[in-house]
Amino acid sequence: MQRYFVDSIIEGKVRISGDDVKHISRVMRMDIDDSIICISQEKGPFLCKITSLSGEEVVAEVMEHIDSNTELPVNVSIAQGLAKGDKLDYVIQKGTELGAYDFFSFTASRSIVKWDQKKAVKKQERLQKIAKEAAEQSYRLKIPEIHPHQSFPELLKKMKSFDAVLVAYEEQSKMQENSQFVNVLTSLKSQQSLLVIIGPEGGFDETEIQALIEHGAITCGLGPRILRTETASQYVLAAISYQTELLR
Amino acid sequence: MQRYFVDSIIEGKVRISGDDVKHISRVMRMDIDDSIICISQEKGPFLCKITSLSGEEVVAEVMEHIDSNTELPVNVSIAQGLAKGDKLDYVIQKGTELGAYDFFSFTASRSIVKWDQKKAVKKQERLQKIAKEAAEQSYRLKIPEIHPHQSFPELLKKMKSFDAVLVAYEEQSKMQENSQFVNVLTSLKSQQSLLVIIGPEGGFDETEIQALIEHGAITCGLGPRILRTETASQYVLAAISYQTELLR
C-alpha cells in the first residue's frame, strides 16, 4: 500500500498538501474510500481512508495504528566527504533505504567539487526530497535529516555529540585491519549514536586523519577490498543491520 | 599503484594489449621503468616494471609476487532479475567491489524490460567491462564472470550446482523473518558456493517463489526495511563480508 509521511494527525484526521496531493490523485489515481498509510514521525504509521480530494488537499481518516518498527536499533549518522557527480544523491537514496538516521556532507581537502552557499542550499533541498521518497519506499518511520553542508573544522566540532565515531580508512583496509569496526559495533547499545565519516574520492590526507583521531574518531577497515567513496556507507549500514537486526 | 588484469605471465614477462595500453600510456602517462601491478587470475598479483611501450603493446618485467588475498572466503554468485534503466550496471559495479564471485541475470515474469538475443550479447560485453574496471579499482584478484542472460527455467536448472541458494523475498522482510539469512551464512564453509537470487522491481510472483522453493532455494528477509531491487545484492555481499571476513 502507498505510504506518505504527514506533518500531523489531529483528531483522527490527516491533511495532506504539496507534491503528495498530485501523487495521490494523478500518479496513483486514487479516489474517496481508497486506503493509504500515513506516517507521522512522532506517532508512527496509520492505516487511513481518503475522505476528500481536491487539487490542493487530500483529507484522510485514521482507521488504525500499525504496529511495526523498521528503524535501526542504533542511530547511525553518515558524514560523506563531497564527491563528484551525483554520488551524494546515491549515498542519500541507498543510505536511507539501509536505515541511516541522518546525513552530513563536508568538504575535505581532496574534494574536487566545491559548493558555494547558494548551491549548497539548493542541493540540501534536493537531497531532502530524495531522502523522503526513499524513506516512503523502504517503509521507514523517519525521514533522515539532511544537515546543511559544512567545512571539515565544523565536522570536527560536531563529533563530540556522538557515542562513537568511526572513520572508514582505506589504508586500514589495505593493512587488513578487521577488528575496530566489529569492536565498536558490538559495544553499541540500543538507541546509542554512531557517526561514520567517509572521505571523498581520494580519501583523507594525513593531516585530516590525525585531526579526526585527536577528536576521538576510531579508524577502521571495511574488509580487504577497496570500496569507492559512494559504496562505503552502504557496506557500513548493511553490516550494522546484519549485526543489530539479524544476528541479535 | 595502478592495477591491470593480464592474460598470462610467461618467463617473468607480461604482455599487455587492448584498451589497457591506451590507459597506461595516454591516461596515466606512464613510461619505461614505471611500476604497475599486474594480476594474473591464476597466479595472483605481481609488482612489475614497464620495459617497453608502443601504440599496440606494453611489456613489463615481473619484479616480485605480492602476497595478498582480497577475495571473499565463500563464493557468492548473484542472480539478478532484469530491472529497468542502468540498474544492472550498478549491481555489477557495486557487487564486484563488494566481492561477488560471478553474476547471472534472468527475465522474471514482472521484468518490465525484455532483451532480445542481440541486445543480451551487447549488454553482456558491456557488463563484463564494468566488472573488469571495478575489480581493478577494488583490488580484486579475480574478475567476476558475467554469464549469458537466461530465462527463469534456465535459472532453476542452474540452482543444483550450488551448496546453498537464497532468495531475497520482501514478503519475508515485511514479516520480520530474520533468521534464515544468518542460518545459511553461518553454516557455509570456506570455498563453498552460495547463489543469491533477487527479483526485478515488482519482486517475484507466487508461482516463481514456489518453483524456487521446490528447486531447493531458501527464502529470507534482509532486515525490516524494503530494499530496492538494485540494493539487495549490496546488503547481502556487505553482510557476508562482515560475517566471514570481519567477525571470524
Image: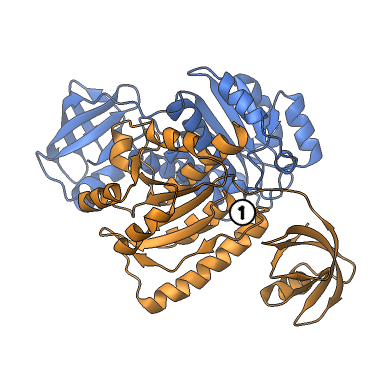
Chain colours: A orange, B blue
Q: Residue at x 52, y 17 (%)?
A: B189
For the C terminus of chain A, which image quadrant?
top right
Label 1 crowd bin: few (<14), some (14–19), many (20+), radius 10 Å: some
Residue B210 drawn above or below residue A215: above
Secondary structure under badge 1? loop
For the N terminus of chain A, which image quadrant?
bottom right
Residue with the mark numbered 1: B84
Left-right relation of A197 to B241: left
Q: Is residue A165 visible?
A: yes
Q: Position of residue B141 (x, y in %)?
A: 35, 30
Q: Looking at the picture, tell me which residue is in the foreground, B167 or A1.
A: A1
Three-letter amino acid code of the residue under disc 1: Lys
Q: Residue at x 60, y 61 (%)?
A: A143
Chain of the residue on which disc 1 is drawn: B
Callout count: 1
Q: Position of residue B92 (x, y in %)?
A: 49, 43
Q: Position of residue B95 (x, y in %)?
A: 48, 40
Q: Residue at x 81, y 74 (%)?
A: A59
